[in-house]
Image (spheres, rainbow, N blue to C red):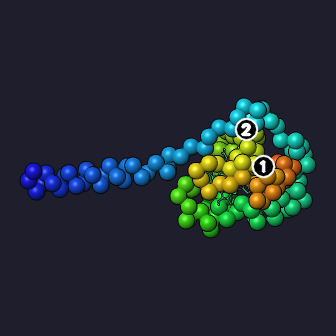
C-alpha cells in the first residue's frame, strides 16, 4: 500500500469507529408491556389547576429536573455527563405520541441501560403510584407543545 492508500485506510478506520460509537443517539426506549399501555391516568384533567402544578413542580424539581430540565427539553444540569441523553419531552408531538401507561411504566421502573432509574414504591426514591401519575399530569400540562 502506498502512502495515499494508508491514509485512506486510516481515515476509513476512524470513520467506522465513529459510526460505531454514534449508536447512543439512536437509542430507543422500549415499549411498555400491553397491560401498562392500556392504563389511563386516574387524575382528572380538570383537577390539574394552578395549585396542582405548583405542588407537583416541587416534586419534579427535586427528582427529575436535573436530567429532564425545567422546560422538559432534556437539558438539565446532570444531562451533560450522561451518555444516553434524556429525550426532549417538550418536542412538538412527543408527549402526544406517548401513552399514559408508557410514561407511567418508565417512571415506575426506569429504562434499562440508561441513567433513567425507576422511582416507584419499590425503588430508592419510593414514590407512590399516585405521585407518579401526578408527575405525568404535570409533564403533560407543562411540556406538551
Ligand atoms: C439521572 C437522569 C434522569 C433523572 C433524574 C430522571 N430521568 Fe427520566 N429519563 C432519563 C433518560 C436517560 C431517559 C431515557 C432516554 C430517552 O429519554 O430517550 C429518560 C426517559 C424518561 C421518559 C420518557 C419515557 C418514554 O417512553 O418516552 C420519561 C417520561 C421520564 N424519563 C420521566 C422522568 C421523571 C418523571 C423523572 C423524575 C421522577 C425522571 N424521569 C428522572 C434520565 C433521567
Residue 34, image x, y percentages = 72, 31
Task: Kindly identify the residue that appears in the image at 53 percent across and 46 percent down.
Answer: 27
Whether residue 61 is situated above or below residue 2 in the rendered picture: below
Residue 41, image x, y percentages = 83, 41
Whether residue 136 is situated above or below residue 97 in the rendered picture: below
Please name the residue that numbered disc 2 is placed on. Answer: 99
Residue 88, image x, y percentages = 62, 52
Task: Kindly identify the residue that appears in the image at 80 percent across and 36 percent down.
Answer: 39
Left or right side of 126 for 80: left
Task: Kindly identify the residue that appears in the image at 25 percent across and 50 percent down.
Answer: 12
Whether label 2 touches label 1, CB < 8 Å: no
Whether residue 125 is situated above or below residue 42 in the rendered picture: below
Q: Secondary structure at mark 1?
A: helix
Q: Nearer the viewer, residue 114 or 28?
A: 114
One can see residue 33 in this view: yes
Number of residues whose C-alpha sits closer than 10 Å to that of mark 2, classed few (under 14), some (14–19) or many (20 or more): some
CB at mark 1 closer than 8 A to ligand 1? yes
The disc label shown at residue 136, or none: 1
Left or right side of 113 for 136: right
Q: Quadrant of residue 28?
A: top right
Amino acid at each position: 500500500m502506498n502512502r495515499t492508500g494508508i491514509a485512506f485506510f486510516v481515515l476509513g478506520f476512524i470513520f467506522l469507529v465513529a459510526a460505531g460509537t454514534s449508536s447512543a443517539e439512536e437509542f430507543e426506549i422500549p415499549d411498555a408491556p400491553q397491560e401498562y399501555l392500556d392504563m389511563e391516568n386516574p387524575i382528572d384533567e380538570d383537577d390539574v389547576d394552578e395549585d396542582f402544578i405548583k405542588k407537583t413542580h416541587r416534586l419534579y424539581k427535586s427528582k427529575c429536573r436535573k436530567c429532564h430540565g425545567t422546560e422538559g427539553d432534556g437539558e438539565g444540569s446532570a444531562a451533560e455527563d450522561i451518555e444516553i441523553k434524556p429525550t426532549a419531552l417538550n418536542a412538538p408531538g412527543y408527549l402526544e405520541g406517548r401513552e399514559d401507561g408508557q410514561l407511567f411504566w418508565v417512571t415506575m421502573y426506569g429504562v434499562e441501560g440508561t441513567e433513567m432509574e425507576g422511582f416507584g414504591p419499590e425503588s430508592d426514591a419510593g414514590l407512590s403510584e399516585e405521585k407518579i401519575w401526578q408527575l405525568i399530569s404535570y409533564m403533560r400540562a407543562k411540556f406538551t407543545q
